[in-house]
């Protein structure tokens, strides 16, 4: 990434890199977003209801866990550490795998996600940040709640979108990645259909198919959505500040395992180019373990991590 992509503008500069959707585009965008954010919680309600008398089978649990891990790693290692921050280099096949896995998390197409996230770092918690909890125009508790709502998922419905030409020209110039980005709808359909198909194959019944769809598709997408969105809301609001960053980012240890290391968010904002987010040995960071694994196979190289001296220079506690 060229350094100017993540450069912080001065307060007097106009916010760059934002495009506004037309009324028609916005209507369409809001309908799709509403569908993809409301359907999973309906699935969760049905799943909870189905627990009475049925419980959850090990097959459904395994399908849910496998898809959660595959897509969650796709987001943190692929979308975030590889494509947004270029914190390591991967062989082409692995690059494609991470791009596909991340796309199957239903968190937006790869290039749109990267553009939004680079803008987040450039303006973190200041005017221009697409999802800061600190910019609500209301006082007191109302302002806090509005800010948290906006950072969590309200921003998804905004008419302002990050200009991909401006924030992710490197990825737009990569034909394979552009193709995967354009296949986002197909990959979204696949991420909902595949668990159901596996459920049918394993149990040879319509009931088996539906219950795998409920847990492996809807509940799984719901969980990963809210864990990812909590990084934008909770991890910019509450938790421990270990390093001096230019923003309100915080480390939230209870979320480290389920977020695959993403909740070491203060560490991340202090060293955004680092492939490792849990910077201490005890800081659980499954995304980092995946990077170490593939780096052992020589499929990942050029892994960037801060030196002890760099960490010392920014350490608060
Ligand atoms: Zn952040
Ligand atoms: Zn980041």
Image (spheres, grey):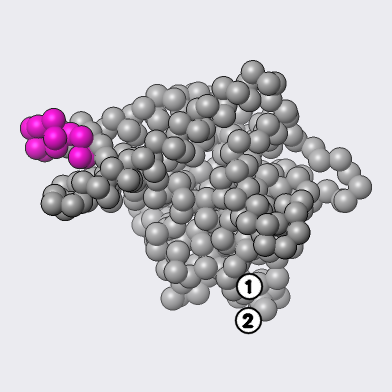
Residue at left offset 11%, top offset 38%: 202
Q: Give the left or right position of residue 209, taking residue 17 as reference.
A: left
> Residue 295 appears in which quarter of the rendering?
bottom left
Q: How many marks?
A: 2
Dot placed on the residue nearer the N-terminal end, 1 or 2: 1
Dot 1 and dot 2 residues touching (CB under 8 Å): yes
> Does 190 appear above or below 255?
above
Question: Residue 69: x percent and y percent?
Answer: 34, 50
Q: Main secondary structure of the magenta part?
A: helix
x, y percent for residue 36: 45, 34
Quick check: is 86 in the magenta stretch?
no
Q: Is residue 205 magenta?
A: yes
- On screen, 135 above or below 101? below
Depth check, front residue: 212 or 23: 23
Helix, strand or loop for disc 1: loop
In the image, residue 240 above or below residue 191: below
Residue 86's spot in the image, x, y percent? 58, 48
Beta carbon of the mark 1 residue lies under 8 A of ligand 1:
no
Q: Quadrant of the N terminus?
A: top right
- Assess disc 1: are there few (<14), some (14-19) or many (≥20) residues with their C-alpha within 10 Å of its C-alpha: many
Label 1, label 2: how far apart the Cα atoms are: 8 Å
**Element carrying mark 2:** loop
Q: Nearer the viewer, residue 203 or 137?
A: 137
Residue 263 visible within the image: yes
What residue is disc 1 on? 241
Q: Which contiguous range is marked in magenta?
A: 201-212
Residue at mark 2: 317
């Amino acid at each position: 990434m060229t350094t100017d992509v993540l450069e912080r503008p001065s307060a007097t500069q106009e916010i760059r890199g934002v495009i506004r959707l037309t009324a028609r585009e916005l209507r369409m965008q809001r309908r799709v977003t509403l569908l993809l954010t409301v359907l999973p919680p309906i699935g969760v309600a049905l799943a909870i209801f189905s627990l009475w008398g049925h419980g959850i089978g090990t097959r459904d649990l395994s399908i849910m866990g496998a898809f959660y891990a595959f897509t969650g790693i796709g987001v943190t290692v692929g979308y975030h550490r590889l494509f947004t921050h270029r914190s390591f280099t991967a062989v082409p096949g692995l690059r494609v795998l991470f791009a596909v896995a991340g796309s199957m998390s239903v968190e937006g197409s790869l290039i749109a996600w990267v553009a939004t996230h680079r803008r987040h770092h450039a303006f973190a918690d200041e005017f221009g940040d697409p999802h800061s909890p600190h910019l609500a125009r209301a006082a007191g508790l109302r302002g806090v709640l509005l800010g948290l709502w906006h950072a969590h998922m309200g921003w998804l419905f905004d008419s302002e979108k990050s200009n991909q030409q401006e924030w992710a020209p490197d990825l737009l110039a990569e034909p394979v990645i552009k193709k995967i980005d354009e296949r986002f709808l197909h990959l979204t359909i696949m991420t909902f259909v595949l668990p159901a198909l596996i459920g049918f194959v394993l149990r040879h019944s319509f009931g088996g198919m539906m219950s795998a769809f409920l847990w492996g598709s809807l509940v799984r997408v719901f969980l990963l959505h809210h864990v990812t969105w909590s990084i934008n809301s909770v991890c910019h609001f509450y938790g421990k500040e270990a390093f001096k960053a230019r923003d309100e980012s915080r480390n939230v240890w209870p979320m480290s395992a389920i977020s695959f290391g993403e909740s070491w968010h203060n560490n991340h904002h202090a060293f955004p180019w680092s492939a490792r987010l849990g910077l201490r040995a005890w800081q659980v960071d499954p995304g980092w373990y995946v990077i170490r694994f593939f780096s052992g196979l020589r499929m990942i190289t050029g892994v960037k991590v801060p030196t002890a001296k760099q960490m010392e220079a920014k350490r608060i506690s």
